[in-house]
Amino acid sequence: MNPITLSIVLTSLALGTIFTVSSSHWLLAWMGLEINTLAIIPLMTQYKHPRAIEASTKYFLTQAAASALLLFSSLNNAWLTGEWSILDLTNPLSCATMTIAICMKLGLAPFHFWLPEVLQGLSLTTGLILSTWQKLAPMAILYQISPMLNTPLLLTIGLTSTLVGGWGGLNQTQLRKILAFSSVAHLGWMVSILPFSPQLMILNLTIYLIMTSTMFLTLMTISSTKISSLATSWSKSPTTTALSLLTLLSLGGLPPLSGFLPKWLILQELTNQNTTILATVLALSALLSLFFYLRLTYVVTLTSSPNTSNMTITWRHHSKQPTILLAILLILSSFIIPISPLMVM
């Protein structure tokens, strides 16, 4: 892509998110989301491949439908209350439709079907942007309107997302689809805790962004998009591969790694709110996600691919060393728990 075009697209992407995060008016928030959507389409289609065009089309149609529903919700609320402020979402119908619209934008179950297909058709770099930066603006809106939202609806969507994210990733062989279902499951945890403790949602989102960025950057370093190619990653970048195992286990939420911290605090808060059954089901659904993370770890450490690999094993080449950014993210995605008391204070 032309450097000038790329700079315009990335600037628009940043401005769209900033507009939405900093606005208090529904029209400005909607405008920021639209700029965000239109800015990432050129990044999706920069590689002229049928899968990329299909993914960008699916993404555009889904985001356009969600934006239309969000605009309808804000118009309906303004018609009945006379207020365009984000913090004055008081109409029950507007609250429900707004929740559905934002869940469609985020890819939460049962509106998640577009996310694995879209992510599979993109490059790892664009997939990184879609899985991290594109979550910020909708989550900022959810955070602002959390006191007005329907708690049973949010809990139902959160519980469904964690279960779907766990079940969906079990039979996948493509790493981008696995990370897509991982995103669905993690967002389900965030939505489940949102009605009770928005601060915990922010903590969970921050750690999720760190872990997902680490995983995508690792896959870019070892040039791997399938489980079968993970078995040959040791010869490409031994240091990065070794540290990425901790990131995988952290994504699964194993103690004492970073991914355990938000799950631990969320389960504690849900128990304090007398939603013990919800906390139990969420904890059990995390085992589903942990299974396919452990499978990836097993492939990397102990086995080669169980079938004949179509990949050319790169015996003679220069090994890639992790960049400073990737090294910092690898450390953060694994060892945040020792400094967590400083974050809580």
Image: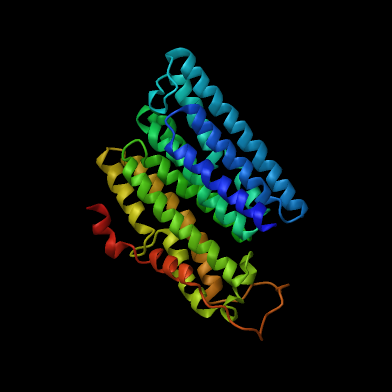
Asked whether 259 or 164 is in front, the reply is: 259
Visible in this render: residue 110? no
Label tally: 0
Left or right relative to 137: residue 45: right
The extreme bottom residue here reads 316
Asked whether 5 or 163 is in front, the reply is: 5
Rendered-image quadrant of the N terminus? bottom right
Q: Residue at x 61, y 53 (%)?
A: 7
Q: Is residue 3 above or below residue 299?
A: above
Q: How is the image coloured?
A: rainbow
* Quadrant of residue 228 within the rendered picture: bottom right
Left or right relative to 326: residue 58: right
Q: Position of residue 205 (x, y in %)?
A: 41, 49
Q: Residue at x 30, y 50 (%)?
A: 265
The extreme left residue here reads 345
* Quadrant of residue 303 within the rendered picture: bottom right
Q: Position of residue 172 (x, y in %)?
A: 61, 57
Left or right relative to 163: residue 340: left
Q: Residue at x 63, y 64 (%)?
A: 225
Q: Residue at x 50, y 31 (%)?
A: 28
Q: Is residue 41 above or below residue 96?
A: below
* Quadrant of residue 139 within the rendered picture: top left
Q: Is residue 242 above or below residue 175?
A: below
Asked whether 259 or 46 is in front, the reply is: 46
Visible in this render: residue 315? yes
Q: Position of residue 299 (x, y in %)?
A: 56, 71
Q: Position of residue 122 (x, y in %)?
A: 66, 54
